[in-house]
Image: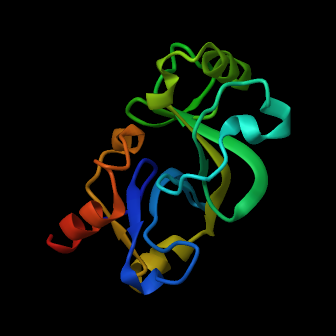
Amino acid sequence: MQVATGSIIISTTALEGSIFERSIIVIAEKNELGATGFIVNQLLPQSFNHLEEFKNYPSFPLYNGGPVEQEGLFFLHRIPDLIHDGIQVKDQVFLGGNFEDALELIHQQSSVITNIKLFIGYCGWDAGELEAEIEEGSWIVTNALVEQIFETTNTFNWQLLYSASIKK
């Protein structure tokens, strides 16, 4: 299976002991220059309002998106009618957009918790790098739908995806 924008990849046991152990990653962008993605199943112990700039906001889950640009805050969402200017990843999932729109929704504590994922950092691969890692057996491209990243960790977890993917 080819990796593309919107694909969900999971780490194999070859990556045990690394930062990517038991990781589920959504590929947010894939082109001739390489790929960018976010780890969607590594919840950080601190929430969004623990960041100094956002201390007056309500608690909101924050994920470790990956080892690159650990000072950066990124987000994926599925509410383009409420968060404008996002880049479509696939179907109804968007990367970024107007951060002020996202902040307003988080501040209002509306039902955004199931529609936005916030990340510190991201994962990045140069051209051909991710394909080589897939070929060597570090990653499996799954049949999971990108919308599933917004589901709880109980229904969208590494073990379930890994078990389903190796049975193919």
Name above or below for residue 78 compared with residue 167.
above
Query: Image point 44% across, 30% down: which residue?
Result: 114
Quarter of the figure with residue 65: bottom right
Q: Quadrant of the C terminus?
A: bottom left
Give residue 107's position: percent from left, percent from top: 66, 18
Residue 33 in view of the camera? no
Instruction: Name the one closer to the observer, 53 or 70.
Output: 53
Of all residues, the one furthest to the left in this rendering is 167
As rendered, which of 121 and 87 lies closer to the eye?
A: 121
Q: Of residues 95 and 118, which is closer to you in this image?
A: 118
Which residue: 60% across, 28% down? Answer: 86
Residue visible at 50% across and 29% down? 113
Relative to 138, residue 63 above or below = above
Q: x and y percent of residue 116 in the render?
A: 52, 32
> In the rendering, at what x and y percent does residue 9 appear?
40, 62
Residue 95 in sight from this viewpoint: yes
Residue 121 position by quadrant: bottom right
